[in-house]
Image: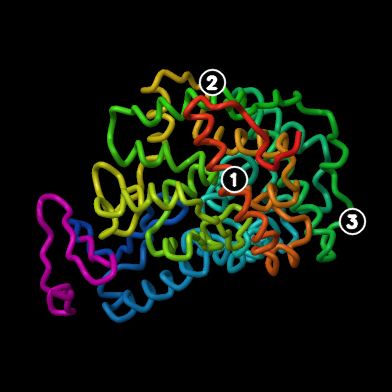
Amino acid sequence: MALSDTAARNAKPKSTPYKLAGERALYLLVKLAGKYWRFDYRFGGKRKTLALGVYPDVSLKAARDARDDARKQIAAGIDPADNRKATKAAKRGDDPNSFEVITREWIEKYRKTWTPNHITKVVRFFEQDVFPWIGKRSVNVIAAAEILLMLRRIESRGANEIAHRIKQNCGRVFHYAIATGRAERNPVADLQGALEPLKVKHHAAITDPKAVGALLRATEGYQGNFITQCALRIAPLVFVRPGELRKAEWSEIDLAAAEWRIPAERMKMRATHIVPLSRQAAEALRELHPLTGSGRYVFPSERSRDRPMSENTVNAGLRRMGYAKDEMTGHGFRSMASTLLNEQGWHRDAIERQLAHGERDAVRAAYNYAEHLPERRRMMQAWADYLDRLKTGAEVVSLHGRA
């Protein structure tokens, strides 16, 4: 039953706060101190709450309108809470050339090209590690030494990778400020080599053909959850990113056409990605369909069919089969395919396109998501056949018939 103005008006405080539920995650929080409109939502994989005002100063209709505005922002890839902070900063009359104001403007400009999870991380890093130190400073007076001191604070707690990421993003903000006529130079450029170098981390992957065969045989004999086993069987056949695999939806998969189309909003590079399904991949999906096909997700969580499997599920399955984290990871199926397909002589562009690696030319990426598709279809079927031969212990031969 929808929340009415009468119910809101007549709600009496109790010894403990309680909620009067409305529609679409709107509710009235009743406390001894008063009645407060709240809206719960998810953004970047995290649950958040947005305050919409105090009743009766803010009526039920006004709260609903505010909720609807917030939902529209979310649909457009904008976090309502972050948008509110930027708006308040502008109303306070903050220096329009301050680093924080320009940074929030830069974030809003690129929201549509970033995933929600990436947006959340970028905003969190700036709010926690940057704005308290240089946020109110004008971009034209911030010196390289100030930025370095800020980055040293991050390094001092052992977060070297975060320090490098923040340095890179600060540089992008300054470039944006220069492009929009509010800064004359980028002081981050003076910090080349000032931070402790990062140790390159590679995702553990098995690339030796005999070892790949052993892994595939271990997967066939997996004794754990059937959905997890199916994910482990399909992962090497499609070699998408782990997040793309676990969030796969049945609505994206056309078994008749042997094709999986991942929508742009779920891809790292924000472009639709086509995954040709080999005969083996399609068979594995058909085997799984009676169990999960009535729901949204191909690989739902064990706890709730309304959520995708945990990001740790595939890696946990590998550990259960005896593979240590420095031997093989869920992301390692991509390295496995990349290494062996390149060794076998397949066209590099076809491999890169199938791995959904980013285009340098954004326009080219938007219009050519189907690039090399005929060769990719041949490659994916040949790859699946090759894996079958490795699994049975057959002699390793070239996929292309080339050395």
Q: Nearer the viewer, mark 1 or mark 3?
A: 1
Upstream in sequence: badge 1 or badge 3? 3
Q: Secondary structure at mark 2?
A: loop
Closest to the observer: 194 or 102?
194
Q: Are marks 3 and 2 in contact (CB under 8 Å)?
A: no
Q: Which residue is mark 3?
A: 184
Figure check: 198 above or below 95: above
Amino acid on which disc 1 is placed = Ala
**What whole-number distance in Å separates the C-alpha atoms at marks 1 and 2?**
25 Å
Badge 2 crowding class, 10 Å Cα cut-off, few under 14, some 14 to 19, many 20 or more, is some
Q: x and y percent of residue 52 in the render?
A: 36, 67
Q: Which residue is mark 2?
A: 327
| Residue 207, magenta (yes or no) | no
**What whole-number distance in Å separates the C-alpha atoms at marks 1 and 3?**
54 Å
Closest to the observer: 12 or 144?
144
Q: x and y percent of residue 129 in the render?
A: 61, 39
Q: In this picture, which residue range is highlighted in magenta?
A: 1-29
Amino acid on which disc 3 is placed = Glu
Q: x and y percent of residue 357 in the render?
A: 67, 49
Q: Secondary structure at mark 3?
A: loop
Amino acid on which disc 2 is placed = Glu
Figure check: 169 above or below 250: above
Badge 1 crowding class, 10 Å Cα cut-off, few under 14, some 14 to 19, many 20 or more, is some
Q: Which residue is mark 1?
A: 382
Q: Tell me the tag on residue 274.
A: none
Q: Secondary structure at mark 1?
A: helix
Q: Is residue 339 left or right of residue 11?
A: right
